[in-house]
Amino acid sequence: MNFEEQYARFLSDHQAARKGERLRRLNEGHASAEKLFLETVWWPLFHHFQYLHPEYEVDDFKDGKRYLDFAYLRQGIKICFEVDGYGPHLKNISRWQFADHNSSGRISS
C-alpha cells in the first residue's frame, strides 16, 4: 500500500476506536502539519504506522488532560512527537502560556 492508502486507513482506524472528546480532538487537532510530518518524516523511515497514536490523551502534572500530536507506544518504549510551528500558533502568547503549552504530560501505562 502507498502512503495515502495507509494514512487513510490509519486515521479511519483511530476514529472508529474513539468517541466523545478524544474523537473530537482527533478530528479537529490532526491537520495538515501532522499529515506532512507523517508523509515526509515518518513514512520514509518506517513505511507503516504501527504503534503510532495520533492526538493521544495524557494526564498532565496539573491533573488535567493534554493531547500529544503523536505517541509511539511499544512495550518499554514511550515517545511523544509534537508538530508545532512557531508562527500564529505561538507568536502572541506570554511566557507563562508558552511554559504551560510546553509542559510535559504523563503517558500512562
Image (cartoon, rainbow, N blue to C red):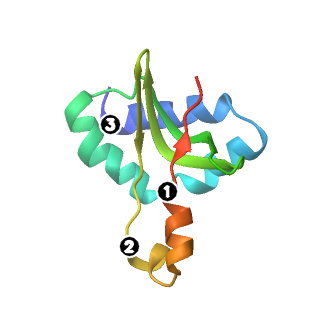
Q: Residue furthest right?
A: 20
Point out the frontmost of discs 1 and 3. Answer: 1
Q: Earlier in the sequence, mark 3 or mark 2?
A: 3
Q: Are marks 1 and 3 in contact (CB under 8 Å)?
A: no
Residue position marked by numbered label 3 in the rendering: 3
Question: Is residue 24 rendered to the left or right of residue 41?
Answer: right
Question: Is residue 21 rendered to the left or right of residue 4?
Answer: right
Residue position marked by numbered label 2 in the rendering: 86
Point out the frontmost of discs 2 and 1. Answer: 2
Percent of width and height locating residue 103: 52, 56
Q: Earlier in the sequence, mark 2 or mark 1?
A: 1
**Which of these two is toward me, 78 or 42?**
78
**Which of these two is toward me, 92 or 96?**
96
Q: Secondary structure at mark 3?
A: helix
**Which of these two is toward me, 43 or 75?**
75
Residue position marked by numbered label 1 in the rendering: 31
Q: Secondary structure at mark 2?
A: loop
For the residue marked with disc 1, what is the amino acid?
A: Ala
Residue at 59% across / 32% down in the picture? Answer: 14
